[in-house]
Image: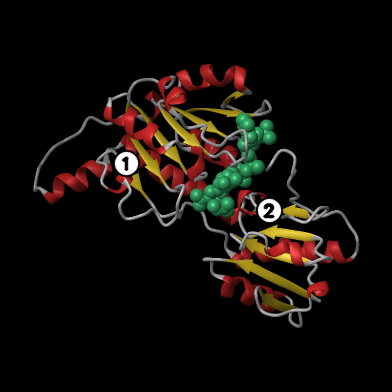
Amino acid sequence: MSITIFSQGRNTGRWADALRERRPGLEVRTYPETVPADEVEFALAWNHPLGAFKDFPNLKCIASTGAGVDHILRDPELPEGVQITRIVDEDLTQDMGMFVTALVLNHVRCLHGYKDAQREHAWKQHRYLRTADVVIGVMGMGVLGSHTAKQLSNLGFKVHGWSRSTKLLEGIGTYAGPEELEAFLSKSDILICLLPLTKKTSGVLNKELFSKLPKGAHVINVARGEHLVDEDLIEMLDNGHLSGASLDVFREEPLPAEHPFWEHPQINVTPHIASITNPASAVSQILENYDRMRHGEPLINVVSQTKGY
Ligand code: NAP
Ligand code: GLV
């Protein structure tokens, strides 16, 4: 009985503790701790060293410790036939909704501007936007996008979403597929990206897409850094088409000290903190899949390796 954690840069200790606490007696190993290669059947992964999985002939499941699986699928040496699962968790979903709501409110009430004014002892009132006058577009209406859209709609914003397939959500307009993207964008005063990173969505936040947003739109990216073409964002902010951006994810993380995003007056940078899986709450679905794997039962939260999410 064992689970092996493959991770670079994320708190493996909290996962190991949560697994041991919930399942005393379970052997939890952390790669590259030496283990007999044929004993590794179940992996828990976040940004594993690429190529690491190919040495384990009996590997059956790779479980992402997050909602996204792009960090697993980018490995060109993934063993064939291995199932990949992801986290779907109430805490993760709620945390994302809260964070995006905070960013939206920060933008419509100009809170960042007041912090700057305070530094200069400047009493300067900004005209603010009322919720009913703001249309928010959510790209990616999956677990996180749908919840975030509903939360913002409940606050009184006009909200609509865009995804691959059409959704039916009370009070929220939906658009689907490339043919409806332009109509969706043309009405989005605030654009929120909650798409998974796949071959189809990489670089989707580019100049051409931004040019279809209303002038003065604000862009929020809490999905992955590779969705955004960095220089296109800067160009569209500098030419005045976009009014600002809130970015939580970056092509390179940590964001390099010399990156222009740090100094840009219209960009808010946060360090990939929108929603971090809480091992104490998500560990039960990992153990459920571990048990299912051992009993030869279908796993839950399995991703499609063809679709990439
Ligand atoms: P999800 O449930 O798989 O939802 C993905 C959504 O994107 C679905 O609605 C899907 O459409 C849509 N989609 C996928 N490809 C598309 C395409 N080519 N065109 C249009 N729509 C497309 O994913 P989730 O759990 O909501 O998570 C979304 C992402 O958030 C993760 O992949 C991760 O990158 C990111 N994330 C970031 C943080 C953070 O802290 N910053 C935390 C957690 C997650 P269908 O519904 O039609 O399939
Ligand atoms: C975080 O980025 C996740 O994918 O859960």
As shown in the figure, which amino acid type bears the numbered disc 2?
A: Arg
Q: Circle 1 sits in a helix, a strand or a loop, which is it? A: strand
Dot 2 crowding, Cα within 10 Å, few <14, some 14–19, many 20+: many
In the image, which disc is placed on residue 183? none
Label 2 CB-ligand 1 distance < 8 A: yes
Q: Quadrant of ligand 1?
A: top right
Q: To which residue does mark 1 refer?
A: 267
Quarter location, residue 33:
bottom right
Q: Which quadrant does the C terminus fall into?
A: top right
Secondary structure under tag 2 reads loop
- Counting labels gives 2
- The residue depicted at 68 percent of the width and 64 percent of the height is 52
Q: Is residue 164 left or right of residue 92?
A: right
Quadrant including the N terminus? bottom right
Q: Measured from the top left, where is residue 248 in percent x and y?
A: 43, 48
The type of residue carrying mark 1 is Ile
Q: Residue furthest right?
A: 296
Closest to the observer: 119 or 49? Answer: 49
Residue under the image location 62 percent in, 62 percent down: 48
Direction bottom: furthest residue: 25
Q: Is residue 143 visible?
A: no
What is the x, y in percent for residue 154? 50, 35
Q: Is residue 14 above or below residue 91?
A: below
**Mark 2 = which residue?**
86
Q: Indicate how the structure is coloured in the image.
A: secondary structure
Visible residue check, residue 174? yes
